[in-house]
Amino acid sequence: MTGKTIDGKAFAGDVRAQVAEHVERLKKDHGITPGLAVVLVGEDPASEVYVAAKHKQTVEVGMASFEHKLPADVSEEDLFALIDQLNEDPTVHGILCQFPVPDHLNERRVVARIDPNKDVDGLSVVNAGLLASGEKGLVSCTPLGCLMLLRDQVGNMSGMDAVVVGRSNLFGKPMAQLLLGENCTVTIAHSRTKDLADVCRKADILVAAVGRAEMVKGEWVKPGATVIDVGITRIPHPDKPGKTKLLGDVEFATAAENAAAITPVPGGVGPMTIACLLANTVTACCRAHGLEEPTGLTV
Ligand code: NAP
């Protein structure tokens, strides 16, 4: 039997529709338009694609989108001056700087400069600390999106064994904190983990975020588990010369035979990230104005 394929694209569409409803209400009832500012340094082609997608979706849900493109050789001082200005701007409720930034800039320092209340990427130490303390902050978008998919798929996760493969600040650590918040028994695995296969086999919820194509084998998946595949690796397309194809961290076809449900790559976790960025911006906007924040769009 093959498990259900979780349709992240459709789910992300639902999240964006909810965001659009809240935006509409904020405009109608309070005369407030949530605003998201995106800062892009340099001309990395992949980053330009991401920023364009963020702009398009921001506008589609009715929010204000502010794009700031800075030259690759911008000084830290000038970048920080822009961030300071956005921190002060009452029409801007969310700020993100698209990474990677050129080598002369330090990502941690850039994130630290953003007002934590506007850090809609949830990457600052303040927001990471709030999450770790079980307090309200802004949660990193991709783990938030995975949690939304899991809540929808699994419902009550209390007491379940959850394994997160990967321990990055961007994904693995916040994902583990969120699962702990759901009362899972959480194991974080990484490159030094002994017998990863055995660790994975215990998981009722298995989340893989490594970036190594199909490293998690189907036979590592416990029968009935829910599998969330965050990894993205681009490989040359086997059938279409000159084209590329995306692979996840999980060997999808064999894993789907054991799993109760599994996210595909592409079309699983990926679309949730921007949807959650928009959700975080609405949440940040409501908090900034002392308004009740929407339920279901945050933890
Ligand atoms: P990262 O910072 O490179 O972290 C990768 C993690 O995988 C590290 O903790 C590393 O362990 C662990 N790892 C490496 N080799 C391993 C192995 N053989 N066995 C077990 N663990 C191993 O990556 P990231 O930023 O978390 O992203 C992970 C993947 O998710 C990437 O493919 C990325 O593209 C994707 N991603 C997708 C989205 C999205 O869909 N929107 C968002 C974020 C990330 P050590 O700490 O021991 O080195």
Image: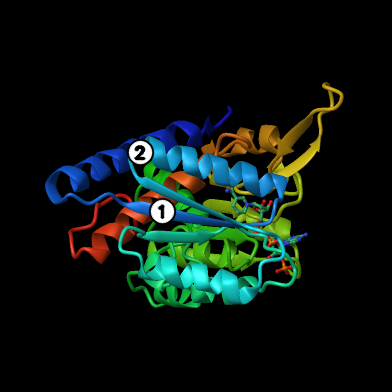
The secondary element bearing badge 2 is classed as loop
Tell me which residue sits at (30%, 39%) in the image: 20
Where is residue 71 drawn, in percent x and y? Answer: 67, 59
Could you say which quadrant of the image residue 18 lies in? top left
In this rendering, the answer to whether 182 lies above or below 32 is below
Where is residue 77 drawn, in percent x and y? Answer: 59, 77
Tell me the number on the disc at residue 61.
2
Furthest residue to the top?
Answer: 239
Q: Amino acid at mark 2?
A: Val
State which image quarter holds ligand 1. Answer: bottom right
Ranked by sequence position, the earlier of labels 1 and 2 is 1
Colour scheme of the picture: rainbow
Tell me the number on the disc at residue 199.
none
Residue that mark 1 sits on: 36
Tell me which residue sits at (26%, 44%) in the image: 23
In this view of the protein, which residue sits in the foreground, 185 or 281? Answer: 281
In this rendering, the answer to whether 48 lies above or below 186 is above
Q: Is residue 192 left or right of residue 48?
A: right
Tell me which residue sits at (15%, 51%) in the image: 30
Q: Amino acid at mark 1?
A: Leu
In this view of the protein, which residue sits in the foreground, 208 or 130? Answer: 130
How many other residues sit within 10 Å of disc 1, few (<14), some (14-19) or many (≥20)?
many
Tell me which residue sits at (15%, 42%) in the image: 28
